[in-house]
Image: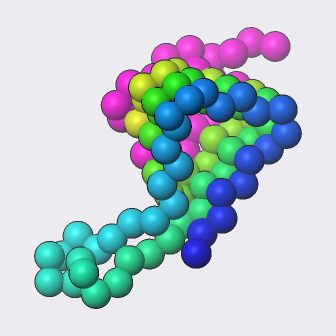
C-alpha cells in the first residue's frame, strides 16, 4: 500500500485521480503482482479538475497543475504544468 500525502492549504478540483498503484509491463507477469508508489503533494498546490497523477510523483510547493493534465513525473516548486504528459509552461514568481 502506498501513501498519498497532501500538504497544507491545497486546492483539488473535481474528478481528480490519484493512482498510487501500477503493474508490470511484461504480459506474463502482469497478473502476478502489482506495486505501489507514494504520491506527495506539497503545500499550497492547486490541482485543477480532471487531473491524473500517477504513483511515484512529487508535486512541489506552490505549484499549479492545469485542468485535464496527466502528471507522470515530478513537478518542481513554483511552476505551472499542463498537458499530457504535463510539462512546465510557466514559472511562478513570488
Against 29, residue 90 (above or below) is above
Q: Determine whether, in the image, residue 51 is placed left or right of residue 34.
A: right
**At which x and y percent is residue 4?**
65, 57
Which residue is situated farthest in the front direction here? 14
Corner quadrant of residue 25? bottom left
Q: Determine whether, in the image, residue 80 is placed left or right of residue 9.
A: left
Q: Quadrant of the N terminus?
A: bottom right
**Residue at 48% over, 55% down:** 19
**At which x and y percent is residue 36?**
50, 71
Against 92, residue 58 (above or below) is below
**At which x and y percent is residue 65?**
56, 27
Against 48, residue 9 (above or below) is below
**Residue at 67% over, 52% down:** 40
Which residue is situated farthest in the right direction here? 8
Q: How is the image coloured?
A: rainbow
Is 56 inside the magenta-drawn segment?
Answer: no
Which residue is situated farthest in the left direction here? 27
Residue range in magenta is: 71-94
Amino acid at each position: 500500500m502506498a501513501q498519498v500525502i497532501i500538504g497544507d492549504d491545497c486546492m483539488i478540483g473535481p474528478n481528480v485521480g490519484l493512482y498510487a498503484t501500477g503493474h508490470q509491463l511484461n504480459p506474463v507477469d502482469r497478473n502476478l503482482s502489482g506495486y505501489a508508489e507514494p504520491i506527495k503533494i506539497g503545500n499550497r498546490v492547486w490541482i485543477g479538475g480532471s487531473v491524473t497523477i500517477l504513483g511515484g510523483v512529487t508535486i512541489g510547493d506552490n505549484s499549479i497543475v492545469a485542468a485535464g493534465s496527466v502528471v507522470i513525473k515530478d513537478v518542481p516548486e513554483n511552476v505551472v504544468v499542463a498537458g499530457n504528459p504535463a510539462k512546465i509552461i510557466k514559472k511562478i514568481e513570488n
